[in-house]
Image (cartoon, rainbow, N blue to C red):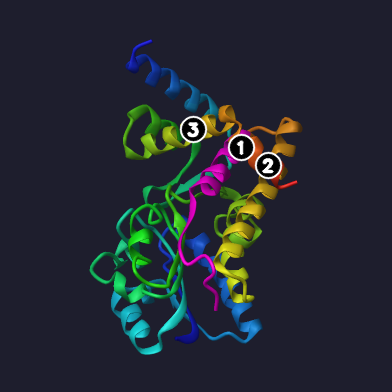
């Protein structure tokens, strides 16, 4: 799979995740601002700085899930 | 060094409104503990006023709320209050920056060659807000999942604990809240994984630089 295809697939995954968020929730991302789910999706589609940040957060989370880092942290906490 | 604490609370958008509210709970706690605090709220959170105060009163604990980046911390209306130009003002202090990204470079520089400590974030500090309560952050139980654990840092330090204890205590609270969110997921509540990943972002991004045994 090309890098471009990988990026598109990742964006699709992020957009699907945003899509199931309840409509009453907004995400505050520091200096980027506070965004409704529609606005989050727009930023991801555009691929601007806020959008890249949202995608990167998803990548970090997937890595934590697949590497076992998240489960390890939760288990250590009893 | 003075026993007074310094708190910045700019307030000009949804994000800073919430940070400001949660920082007000810390001010109340300091008052209850008899610890003097100087509150730089709204427009007062500016470089000139804060510089004068630090030079005059020499606070041991500096609690910054607002926006940030790798090289700077911001006050009201996105105006820089700390950057490489004046980071020496933070030398030998305990600094907690509830702000984005300053834990990457700025925090490391602040504690270089001195006995200070810096707790901050290497990623953007993020939280979900329930729009229903955006005018009343105290009622927002969603935002609470993210902001209460961050308050644990300053609360622990006010109660005489070390910076490393404060960092760990806050992370423990985040993990407890992640478990609460996982329960929502088990109950098939929509958006639970989206909520979890934001809390993981703050957990994974929270860093401590400098003296891990620093305390008031």
Q: How much space separates mark 2 and mark 1, taking CA atoms?
A: 6 Å
Residue to which mark 1 is pinned: A70
* Relative depth, front residue between B65 and B214: B214
Q: How much space separates mark 3 and mark 2, taking CA atoms?
A: 19 Å
Residue to which mark 3 is pinned: A58
The N terminus of chain B - image quarter: bottom left
Left or right: B121 as drawn, with respect to B154: left
Magenta stretch bounds: B193-216
Q: Could you tell which of marks 1 and 3 lies nearer the N-terminus?
A: 3
For mark 1, name the chain: A
The image shows residue B123 at horizontal and vertical percentages of 43, 47
Q: Residues within 10 Å of mark 1 (few under 14, many from 20)?
A: some
Q: Residue at x 60, y 76 (%)?
A: B158
**Which structural element holds mark 1?**
helix
Q: Is residue A20 in view from this perspective?
A: no
Q: Residue at x 46, y 79 (%)?
A: B60
Left or right: B94 as drawn, with respect to B171: left
Badge number at residue A74: 2
Badge number at residue B100: none
């Amino acid at each position: 799979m090309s890098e471009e295809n990988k990026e598109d697939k990742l964006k699709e995954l992020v957009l699907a995740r945003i899509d199931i968020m309840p409509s009453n929730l907004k995400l505050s991302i520091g200096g980027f601002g506070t965004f409704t789910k529609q606005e989050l999706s727009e930023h991801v589609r555009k691929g601007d700085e806020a959008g890249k940040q949202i995608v990167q957060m998803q990548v970090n989370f997937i890595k934590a899930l697949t590497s076992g880092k998240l489960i390890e942290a939760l288990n250590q906490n009893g | 060094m003075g026993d007074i604490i310094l708190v910045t609370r700019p307030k000009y958008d949804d994000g800073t409104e919430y940070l400001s509210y949660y920082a007000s709970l810390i001010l109340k706690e300091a008052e209850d503990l008899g610890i003097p605090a100087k509150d730089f709220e709204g427009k007062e959170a500016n470089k000139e006023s804060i510089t004068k105060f630090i030079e005059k009163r020499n606070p041991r604990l500096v609690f910054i709320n607002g926006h940030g980046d790798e090289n700077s911390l911001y006050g009201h209306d996105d105006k820089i209050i700390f950057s490489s130009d004046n980071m020496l003002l933070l030398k030998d202090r305990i600094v907690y920056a509830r702000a984005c990204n300053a834990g990457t470079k700025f925090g490391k520089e602040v504690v270089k060659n001195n006995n200070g400590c810096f707790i901050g974030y290497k990623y953007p500090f993020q939280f979900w807000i329930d729009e229903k309560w955006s005018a009343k952050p105290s009622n927002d139980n969603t935002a609470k999942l993210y902001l209460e654990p961050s308050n644990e840092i300053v609360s622990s330090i006010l109660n005489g604990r070390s910076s490393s204890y404060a960092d760990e205590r806050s992370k423990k609270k985040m993990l407890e809240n992640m478990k609460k969110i996982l329960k929502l997921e088990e109950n098939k509540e929509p958006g639970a994984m989206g909520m979890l990943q934001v809390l993981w972002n703050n957990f994974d991004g929270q860093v401590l630089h400098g003296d891990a045994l620093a305390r008031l």
